[in-house]
Amino acid sequence: MSSVDSNRVVLDPRFAPPFPQGALLVLRNPQLRKNVAHAIDVIQTKRDKLVAEKTDWQALRTAASAVREHVLANLGEYLVQFEERCTAAGGIVHWAADAAEARSVILDLLRQENANEVIKIKTMTSAEIQLNPFLETNGINVFETDLAEIILQLGEEEPSHIVVPALHVNRSQVREIFARRMGLKNLSDDPQELTNAARKYLRQKFLTIPTAIGGANSLIAETGSVAVVESEGNGRMCLTLPRTLITLAGIEKVIPRFQDLEVMLQLLARSATGERMNPYTSLWTGVLPGDGPQKFHVVLLDNGRSSILAKPKQRQTLKCIRCAACMNACPVYRQTGGHAYGSVYPGPIGAILTPQLMNMEHAQSLPFASSLCGACYEVCPVKINIPEVLLELRSQVVNQEREQASRIFDPLYLGLRIANFLFSSAGRFHTAQGLGRIGAHLFTRKDGWIHSLPGVGAKWTQTRDLRGLPPQYFHEWWAARRKEAK
Amino acid sequence: MNTSSRQRILERVRSATGAAAPARIAETYAALPRDYIRQGAMTREACLGRMIERLREYDAEVVETAPEQLLTAIGAQLEASGKRVFVAPEGLPGEWLIPGFDWKVDRGLTTAEIEAAEGVVTAAFCGIADSGTIALHHSPAEGRRVLTLLPDWHLCILRASQVVETLPEYFSRCPKPPALATYISGPSATADIEMTRIKGVHGPRFLHVLLVHDEGIFRVAIRQGLDSESARLTERDDLPALPGTPDEL
């Protein structure tokens, strides 16, 4: 593989390298590791402090989890209710079974508007359906408006986190990108100055581009309203100034009532950014005469969600409110960053969501990208038992592999079958231990550790050392001790 | 609209979950656990103190005033801002439009006119002390959404009686779900570059909150504190005793 290829980040699970290979990109780059660790440490410290001050945190989690489970159990009814109320308020609801349909629905809507430019609020769902490259190919200029998204778009970088997508880029890299793409030669790397540059760069676009695309944090079935939480005000700009607004949302985003926001909003900002509340939350209902866009479309996206819904253990994946607390808490994500996951959804939630969205046909390495420590479950504001889903998916991946005939000759599977044979009788086990000692002796260094093994054994030793076999096994010591006692 | 996709998605969803009768859904919804804190336990004094503290943590500026001193306080804030051109929602009480400034009242202002303004003055629907949040429902005194978005400086007039302690208390105060709402917790901010909090990206960079003590708790103390300050900042003493504050409900 050429060096260019190995440095290219691929976030399409169909083409991305398996996790252990993707992880090397960051593991071999000290600057990237430093950037990721710094960002994660800052968020985690703030989050822990603000969660600790909330004496009813566990009760809020329980309530949020129950609301989300209730919605999923009755999703059809709540979707229809949302559609009905949103339509009554002047919105137009579209349904998209998969990514391709969502892309073409959105393109058609933009063509109806004769739009050749569009401003965008950060939305993970649009990244999931790879909307930007599709629109660009079809002659529509897309302007991301979230600061992190601008950094990524102008720098031709890929997102590595779902809340702070550019956390792997440091200030001097941002300075370089902005100086080059905005033509600002004298820009310093002061975050305030960089932020001001972004403000200036976007202001005219907000005021002149009449079409916007955004996502949704919640769709409220009771009223047909949509809620969007954000920090910068770019969301409010996109939701308020354009003539036409297109909201793309996964079908799982519904909540029953307006009042359920009292639970979600208390959990979301604290979990996501370690703030008591995000600076801006916007809520609107259809089209409001004299205020905001006078054409409003909602595109409801399935794209694999309904099949996740059908699987009892896996359904909880859809409770997710995309706060990213799980990736901030994850010891694996902390080391590898987001790109290793080869998906726009990284971290523990990505490790369970991505292979399921891919119908278990791609990203099969992701359920193994975890130590199963459970930190993700502990911080999850809607109590998704991620380790449970990881284990379920692991067993599915193993079963898939077992079904493949070629696996009979795979050294790992062959080895495991032999191990199964040896370990099922004490005599065979002791004989194998004797032979193993001779074999291991060849690889054991002076310090008593095995640092590298050939063949399939390398899978173990490429990331960790193995203690050499001891001169005396426990059962030998036990037998000797009994002999002495007699 | 592609009706076949609609049908296909709904069929897939319903076959995944089974279908429950609406009455049954309402019943299970009503039985969901809600053991979190709904009603705060603070005294009014502590609650207002918390609101102020949280707003200040967001770098919002908070000034307290007695109702009789409201107009003086508004004038002092406008004066201190160094700005001249302000937009005002159509339903803002007329006496809040302090003379001596260039007021653009929103009777259908264009985006360009709003963009050209330096600041905005509005009322609010509610303040939530727990998170230092101001809830706008965009009533005539709170204005269209764009009014509190484009100008760089926002003076928000919040009555003490509008301040609740917890977020659920705000939801209980809504007579019905609002069709439009904006919750503001401090000025526009980002932490996208190395997690350094930067104030002011696209929304107003300066949020000023004028807390009007209409509950009587602090009247005396505030009045004494403000009298000297307002005398310094303005020379007006011919103010009406109790300027009208709007009632959004």
Image (cartoon, coloured by chain):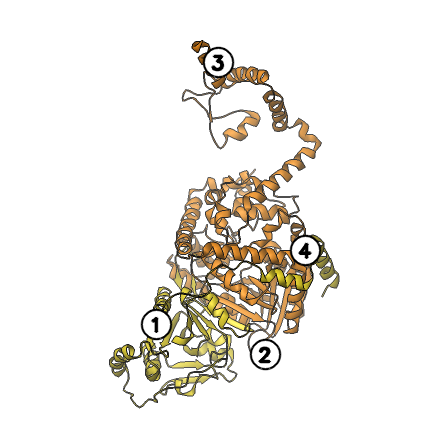
Chain colours: A orange, B yellow
Per the rendering, the mark at residue B62 is 1
Q: How many other residues sit within 10 Å of disc 4, few (<14), some (14-19) or many (≥20)?
A: some
One can see residue A8 in this view:
no
Per the rendering, the mark at residue B86 is none
On the image, numbered disc 3 is attached to which residue? Answer: A479
C-alpha separation, residue under disc 3 versus residue under disc 4? 65 Å
Element at label 1: strand
Q: How many other residues sit within 10 Å of disc 2, few (<14), some (14-19) or many (≥20)?
A: few
Q: Is residue A349 left or right of residue B9?
A: left
User: Cβ–Cβ below 8 Å for labels 2 and 4?
Assistant: no
At horizontal 34% and vertical 88% (from top left) the residue drawn is: B241
Above or below for A307 versus A283: above
Is the residue at mark 3 from the same chain as the one at mark 1?
Answer: no
C-alpha separation, residue under disc 4 versus residue under disc 1? 49 Å
How many numbered marks appear? 4
- Residue A51, image x, y percentages: 42, 55
Is the residue at mark 4 from the same chain as the one at mark 1?
Answer: no
C-alpha separation, residue under disc 3 versus residue under disc 1? 80 Å
At horizontal 45% and vertical 51% (from top left) the residue drawn is: A169
Of mark 2 and mark 4, the one earlier in the sequence is: 4
User: Cβ–Cβ below 8 Å for labels 2 and 3?
Assistant: no
Identified by mark 2, the residue type is: Pro
- Residue A376, image x, y percentages: 50, 47
C-alpha separation, residue under disc 1 versus residue under disc 2? 33 Å
Q: Chain of mark 3?
A: A
On the image, numbered disc 4 is attached to which residue? Answer: A98
